[in-house]
Image (cartoon, helix red, strand yellow):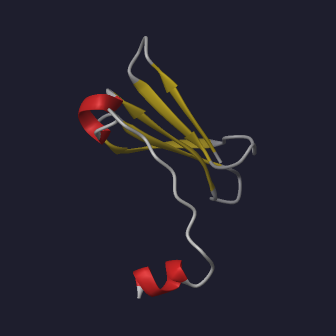
């Protein structure tokens, strides 16, 4: 996974895979998701990221195995 921030357009791009995008869906105003031919998410774009996603600060934390299932359950 890669997260890219483009300051000149205040756009965040989260890339989940390098598969080819065949469909883009508008999730909400300024948020778009790209999907591959099998319907798997390829990337997500957030326009006006600082205002829409609170992107003043970004952090990443990988959860140990099993913790994600506990948090979801």
Q: Which residue corresponds to the image point at 60% horizontal and 75% vertical from the top-left?
A: 64
For the C terminus, which image quadrant? Answer: bottom left
Residue occupying the far top of the picture: 8
Q: Nearer the viewer, residue 4 or 63?
A: 63
| Residue farthest along the right direction in this orientation | 19
Q: How many marks?
A: 0
Q: Position of residue 32 (x, y in %)?
A: 44, 40
Quarter of the image for residue 54 reads top left
Of residue 21 and residue 11, the one placed in the foreground of this image is 11
Q: Height in image: 21 above or below 4? A: below
Residue at screen point 66% across, 42% down: 22
Which residue does the image show at 65% across and 48% down from the upper left? Answer: 1
Direction from residue 72 to residue 29 in the image, left or right: left
Viewed as shown, does residue 3 lie left or right of 32?
right
Pinpoint residue 59: horizontal percent, then vertical percent. Answer: 46, 46
Instruction: Give residue 65's position: percent from left, percent from top.
Output: 63, 79
Point out the residue furthest to the left here: 51
Against 6, is 4 above or below?
below
Q: Residue at x 52, y 81 (%)?
A: 67
In the displayed structure image, the side of residue 33 where residue 47 appears, left or right? left
Q: Indicate whether 8 appears above or below 70.
A: above
* Residue 4: image location, x then y, percent: 56, 31
């Amino acid at each position: 996974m890669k997260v890219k921030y483009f300051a000149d357009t205040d756009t965040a791009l989260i890339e989940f895979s390098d598969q080819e995008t065949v469909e883009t869906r508008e999730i909400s105003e300024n948020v778009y998701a790209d999907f591959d031919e099998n319907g798997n998410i390829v990337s997500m774009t957030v326009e006006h990221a600082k205002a829409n996603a609170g992107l003043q600060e970004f952090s990443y934390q990988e959860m140990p195995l099993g913790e994600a299932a506990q948090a979801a359950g």
